[in-house]
Image (cartoon, grey):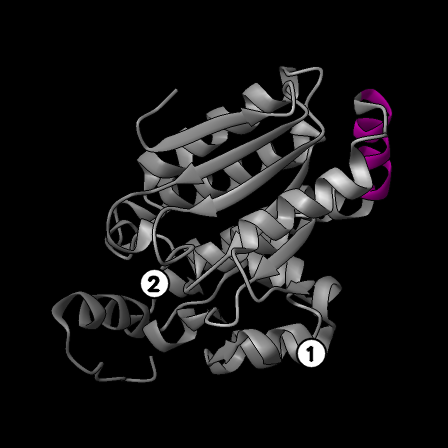
Amino acid sequence: MSELVKVVPLDDGAFWRVTFGGTKGNILDRAMMAALGGVFRDAGRAAPLKAICLEGAGRHFSFGASVQEHLPGQVAVMLAEIRQVVTDLLDSDVIVLAAVRGQCLGGGLELASVCHRIFASPDAALGQPEIALGVFAPIASVVLPARVGRAHAEDLCLTGRTVTATEAHEMGLVDDLTPGDPADAALAWARTHLSARSARSLRLAVRAVRTNLSTRIRTDLPVLEDLYLNDLMTTKDAVEGLQAFLDKRPPVWRNS
């Protein structure tokens, strides 16, 4: 197993506690996404496994995908990597519970939103800030409208604002707001609701209930990636927004 991701099997392999990161903000760079994809592929082959509790190491879930890897010359590979990790999660047919504490932003929220349930601590802050960098969030654009409704999805994706765990819970983005450790809450939920179920039957039920989501990811996401690469990344403002973030300065928009 990669040193970027720690997997702890529990309850005779019925559940895995998966912790990723360890660096500041648990950035989802290409190496991290490849490591997570490997865990989800392993999960697909682990017959007794019923659910994964996915958490970021330390105080935060994730600050999001690597901004450096969004720049021209790297962005096409980065988009392919994040699509692959999402596809690996879907193809595992295993229930994935996101345990969110601290910041869950950008690609981190996209990853959490593809999970079956989000458990969050009161200090959690969630958002899709891509538009502040002059870009947009392809996976969120596909997943969030179905998860929280069009109005909330447009609010998050078009303003780039960060919401509190309470507001996220009210809009349906967070499923369970927990006073303690969200990973403990996620595992307690799994033991209460899944322990008595057949792991094989659960996998088929997951595949059935997620047929529509899986289809949308596979059909709509390539269209949005084309929009991102061939339209967005040819604009001056997209490159300016990303570079300004890396330079730690306000962007100077040209509206072109």
Q: Tell which of 60 and 151 is nearer to you.
A: 60
Asked which quadrant contains residue 198, the reply is top right
Decide if residue 224 is in sight here.
Answer: no
Identify residue type, mark 2.
Thr
Please indicate whether residue 53 sits to the left or right of residue 199 in the image.
left
Whole-percent x, y for residue 19 in the image: 43, 39
**Which contiguous range is marked in magenta?**
200-211
Q: Residue at x 28, y 49 (%)?
A: 69
Identify residue type, mark 1.
Glu
> SS for tag 2?
helix
Q: Which residue is label 2 attached to?
A: 234
Q: Quadrant of the C terminus?
A: bottom left
Q: Residue at x 53, y 43 (%)?
A: 54
Whole-percent x, y for residue 92 in the image: 66, 28
Category of crowding for the residue at label 2, using alpha-carbon neighbours closer than 10 angstroms: few (below 14), some (14–19), many (at least 20): few
Q: Quadrant of the N terminus?
A: top left
Please indicate whether residue 194 sits to the left or right of residue 95 in the image.
right
Whole-percent x, y for residue 22 in the image: 28, 43
Q: Closer to the camera: disc 2 or disc 1?
A: 1
Please indicate whether residue 40 sits to the left or right of residue 241 in the image.
right
Spatial separation of the CA atoms under disc 2 and disc 1: 37 Å
Q: Which residue is label 1 attached to?
A: 170
> SS for tag 1?
helix
- Most prominent secondary structure in the magenta stretch? helix
Q: Residue at x 82, y 21 (%)?
A: 200
Please indicate whether residue 249 sits to the left or right of residue 52 in the image.
left
Whole-percent x, y for residue 34 in the image: 40, 31
